[in-house]
Image (spheres, rainbow, N blue to C red):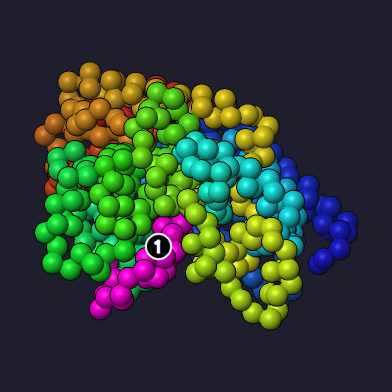
């Protein structure tokens, strides 16, 4: 099982053939889920005491299981937040999986961490962060948000009397992972209302903090750079001003939108990020890396190390070196070198290619918005701030939107899910694939007639 035998050679052929075929698909098929009953009928129990022929197992995956997963990298996948990994990053993911690098600490993963940190540095530089800023690649925005707020609470707690309940101020548009984070941390929320444009502003934050009888229990403010529902960038500079006046930590959830820092045309919208205490941006969203890769950056990483570093006699040797231990900057210990596929692609293609690809997706989203706006049966609801496009099909009910969406997936035309905006069911498409063709949007428009 652990030696490279003739059987391994055969498995290598099967796996690499599949991987090459998948990587060559253009476009990637959308595919769709199957019911539990259908999957059971098609595959049944795959695990027994004696094992199976690899060809048979690969066949289950290739012919039944893989097509029962929607391809988030299909240019017709416009729901949730899609993914558009570069071929280089996907290929290098195979290399990372073929290695056994524990990238928790410099002792074990020096080479990988050295490279990962260069990719992190590029992200930190885009955000105009100081030279001492740093962090770690974690599994996603959720893991980044949680790790950052744990560091925030510990830092603020050092200079404050402990309240009965700690709280975090965040907008009503903050991502669901933050609600989860607060639940895990047993922390309450001061929810700050946003206006018609869904943006958290400095004045709204100031008013909410001023009106709050217990604002001394608040240790952090979370701003969002690219809300999931509408792609709205909060007023970061003003939020930082208000929060820092009061000694609050500012965490910016840029899981989706902070990738826009790579695009000169919108870069200035993120002004103020350079003063944040921490931020997260997911290369597995709009920076063209495969799942799962999120960059968590702290302005002063020492604050995070203080709370996240794990201490035990069996870890002492890991502490013998002064170099960077990524495990110290989030709630984990063992970690895959998940920043390496992103690093490899950045190193191979160069940062100009990333700038161009982010700009291209912005243009694709703007073009889609124009096409939708021009259709007499559709109403564009706002100009896309990033790459989220929102529109209404005149006269449709909630159920009609869902029926249409299900039919589009069933017919393999597009995966576009309705959302709710200020109480109304509408349609939402997120463009993240620089290779998306206008035909996808045109087909959606035609299908809505
Ligand atoms: C703004 C925002 N924050 C956080 C998350 C959670 O990130 P992840 O799914 O990588 O955990 C998302 C996911 O879409 C997001 O859009």
Residue located beneath label 1 in the image = 152
Which residue is at a point 24% across and 52% down the rendered structure image? 171
Q: Position of residue 128 (x, y in %)?
A: 47, 37
| Residue interval drawn in magenta | 138-167
SS for tag 1?
A: helix
Classify residue 373 as left or right of residue 280: left
Which residue is nearer to you in this view: 370 or 193? 193
| Quadrant in which the C terminus appears | top left
| Quadrant in which the N terminus appears | bottom right
- Say if residue 333 shows up in the picture: yes
Say if 82 sits above or below 53 in the image. above
Q: Position of residue 371 (x, y in %)?
A: 29, 20
Classify residue 449 as left or right of residue 9: left
Residue found at the far top of this picture: 374
| Residue 148 included in the magenta stretch of the image | yes
| Residue 26 included in the magenta stretch of the image | no
Q: Position of residue 156 (x, y in %)?
A: 37, 65
Say if 182 sits above or below 203 in the image. below
Tag 1: Cα neighbours inside 10 Å, few (<14), some, or many (≥20)?
Answer: many
Q: How many marks?
A: 1
Classify residue 70 as left or right of residue 424: right
């Amino acid at each position: 099982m652990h030696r490279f035998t003739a059987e391994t050679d055969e498995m290598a052929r099967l796996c690499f053939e599949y991987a090459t075929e998948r990587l060559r698909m253009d476009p990637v098929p959308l595919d769709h889920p199957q019911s539990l009953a259908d999957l059971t009928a098609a595959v049944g129990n795959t695990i027994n005491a004696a094992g199976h022929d690899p060809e048979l197992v690969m066949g289950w995956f290739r012919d039944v299981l893989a097509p029962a997963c929607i391809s988030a990298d299909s240019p017709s996948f416009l729901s949730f937040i899609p993914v558009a990994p570069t071929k280089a990053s996907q290929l290098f993911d195979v290399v990372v999986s073929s290695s056994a690098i524990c990238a928790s600490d410099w002792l074990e993963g020096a080479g990988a961490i050295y490279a990962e940190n260069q990719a992190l540095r590029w992200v930190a530089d885009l955000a105009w962060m100081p030279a001492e800023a740093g962090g770690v690649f974690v599994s996603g925005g959720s893991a980044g948000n949680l790790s950052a707020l744990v560091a925030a609470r510990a830092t603020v707690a050092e200079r404050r009397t402990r309240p009965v309940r700690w709280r975090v101020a965040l907008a009503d548009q903050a991502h669901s992972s933050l609600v989860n984070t607060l639940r895990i941390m047993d922390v309450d929320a001061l929810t700050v209302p946003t206006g018609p444009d869904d943006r958290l502003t400095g004045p709204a934050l100031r008013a909410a903090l001023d009106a709050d009888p217990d604002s001394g229990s608040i240790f952090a403010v979370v701003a969002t750079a690219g809300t999931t529902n509408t792609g709205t960038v909060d007023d970061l500079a003003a939020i930082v001003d208000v929060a820092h006046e009061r000694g609050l930590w500012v965490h910016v959830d840029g899981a989706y939108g902070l990738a826009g820092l790579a695009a000169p045309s919108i870069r200035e919208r993120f002004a103020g990020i350079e003063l944040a205490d921490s931020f997260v941006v997911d290369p597995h969203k709009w920076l063209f890396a495969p799942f799962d890769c999120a960059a968590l950056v702290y302005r002063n990483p020492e604050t995070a190390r203080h709370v996240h570093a794990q201490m035990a006699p069996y870890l002492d040797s890991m502490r013998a070196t002064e170099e960077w231990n990524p495990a110290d900057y989030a709630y984990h210990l063992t970690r895959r070198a998940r920043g390496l596929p992103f690093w490899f692609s950045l190193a191979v293609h160069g940062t100009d290619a990333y700038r161009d690809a982010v700009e291209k997706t912005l243009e694709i989203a703007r073009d889609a918005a124009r096409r939708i706006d021009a259709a007499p049966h559709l109403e564009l609801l706002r100009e896309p701030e990033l790459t989220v496009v929102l529109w209404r099909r005149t006269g449709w009910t909630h159920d009609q939107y869902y029926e249409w969406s299900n039919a589009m997936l069933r017919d393999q035309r597009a995966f576009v899910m309705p959302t709710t905006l200020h109480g109304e069911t509408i349609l939402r498409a997120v463009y993240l694939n620089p290779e998306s063709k206008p035909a996808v949007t045109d087909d959606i428009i035609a299908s809505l007639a």
